Image (cartoon, rainbow, N blue to C red):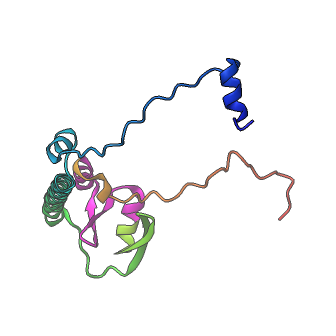
Amino acid sequence: MSKSLKEQLLALGLAPAKKQAPRKPLRHTKIKRDQAVSADISLDQAYRIRKKEERHQKEQDAASKREQQRQRRLVNQKIAALVKKHAIRDESAETKRNFLFKGRIRTVLVTADQNDQINRGRLAVVYLSGNYHLLPSAGVEEVRTFAADHVPDLGGAEPEGEEENPVPDDLMW
């Protein structure tokens, strides 16, 4: 009984004989550099392409920024010409006229007569390079045609929600 159980079963024909395929030795195949490059781009090429795209994007951004500055200068020149032609300046103006412009409260000095004309809509304010200038409404409408963001709204804020939440008549203050 020196034979193992496996050998005994094989001898009797009760166990199937297992055929083992001869093992193939593992071969390390080297990929040629030319084959890898043809399938994909090399790391150096990828960096060069990315750098070129970044440079191109920076150039486009700089060009668009220069164009925006050029457009802004043209608008400012047009407004300056209109201000020079139509501006109403009074050295005796001491009354402050406050208005809301770009989310902040701004001030322009006016006389009492000019303040009345602003309230009636005959005069308006135009913004130019950090200063506010009074112009007749015709000159302001001309500015609005090409630069509406330089003309602040002097109408004042309307009370919001007055119709939505009316004050009851029987409420005693």
Q: Is residue 113 left or right of residue 78?
A: right
Residue at the far front in the pictured view = 1
Residue at x 21% of width, y 44% of height: 36
Q: Position of residue 94 (x, y in %)?
A: 37, 81
Q: Is residue 134 magenta?
A: yes
27 or 49, nearer to the observer? 27
62 or 158, nearer to the observer? 62
Residue 78 showing in the rendered view: no
Residue at x 71% of width, y 25% of height: 9
Residue at the far top in the pictured view = 13
Quadrant where the image shows the N terminus: top right
Q: Is residue 95 left or right of residue 14?
A: left
Q: Position of residue 3 (x, y in %)?
A: 69, 35
Residue 31, relative to residue 82: is it above or below?
Answer: above
30 or 39, nearer to the observer? 30
Quadrant where the image shows the C terminus: bottom right
Occupied quadrant, residue 58: bottom left
Q: Is residue 84 left or right of residue 2?
A: left
Task: Read off the magenta span.
Answer: 116-145
Q: Position of residue 172 (x, y in %)?
A: 86, 61
Residue 22 showing in the rendered view: yes
Numbered label tally: 0
Occupied quadrant, residue 77: bottom left
